[in-house]
Amino acid sequence: MGNKATAVARFSPGMKPKCHVKARCEIYPRSQIKRFPVPDDKVPWTTNFSEYKPVDYTADSILKRPVYADPDIRTEKDSPPLTFNGCDGKINRVSHMGKYEIVDGVPRNPQGRTGLKGRGQLGRWGPNHAADPVVTRWKMDESGKTLNGSDGRPVLQFVSVQRRDNHQWAIPGGMVDAGEVVTATVRREFGEEALNSMEMSPEEKKRLEKELDQLFSTGREIYRGYVDDPRNTDNAWMETVAFNFHDEDNSCFGKIKLCAGDDAMNVQWMDLSGSLDLYASHIDFLAEVAKNHNASW
């Protein structure tokens, strides 16, 4: 399950990206910037939209060039050229969706118009790679009996974190560091957000690593591709690889206490349900997990 630079999206027939909606939210996250309105039928670049005048916005925090951010190649003419649709040193600029277009020197969102150009809150031009661990267990009563939902199927629970930036519930994922494999990312992000590993002593971290070894040694990839994220723009967008790590008999998490940390303000086991309102495309990942386990939805 390595982080291979591949241009082939992997998903089941039910997991193909839909027309993005959250990527066209009226007000861009953590700003007062209003997107140019894009109706559903005008999202594809192949559709003529002569009136289209997207707002140009890149957050000041990104323009200050934190370690994960690219230069503003439109204005910094002396900056080294970036290698799009390929590996740029340790930075993977390959899209899981295939080869993306370069227009006016910058990448074009393969899923269509968003009403905003520039990078917004995203550090990279083009794909910004993340990884999402869906950690699940069966919902049980005190005697250890699996509980069923109203549809007669067993109920799955997943580890959900509440984000600090918008207070929405989400899967505890995060960005893939340069040169990092996605399996390392899912483990690191889960530890930081759901177990608060950043605050642990070296001895506690070592014990935690041992307890998580079995759970994270096996996992099923459920999605690889574009994410309908509110931070997306015409020139920068989120992509992810999502895995399901299932604790069948609760032998791992029966010993581990959840504790929110890093970018999470709360963490809990949450029942899988189609009625959940989650961040970005996370509800679609859960639907796939429920289907794979023949669980209640």
Image (tube, rainbow, N blue to C red):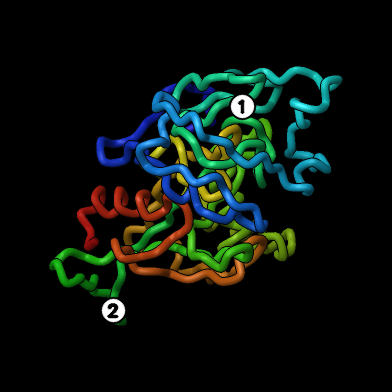
Viewer-side residue, 254 vs 288:
288
Residue 46 image point, x, y percent: 41, 24
Label 2 crowd (10 A; few <14 / some 14-19 / many >=20): few
How far across and down, in percent of the image, does residue 276 sit? Answer: 36, 65
Horizontal arrangement in the rendering, residue 110 relative to residue 202 (left or right): left
Callout 1: helix, strand or loop? Answer: strand
In front of the other: 153 or 145: 153
> Splitting the image into 4 quarters, where does residue 191 fall?
bottom right
Q: Where is residue 155 in the image (x, y as percent from the top left)?
A: 26, 66
User: Closer to the N terminus: mark 1 or mark 2?
Assistant: 1
Which numbered dot is residue 92? 1
Q: How far apart are marks 1 and 2 (CA)?
A: 45 Å
Q: In this view, does 129 lie to the left or right of 179?
A: left
Q: Name the residue under label 2.
A: 141
Quadrant position of residue 251: bottom left
Q: Position of residue 292 (x, y in %)?
A: 25, 48
Residue ID at (58%, 64%): 166
Residue 184 seen in render: no
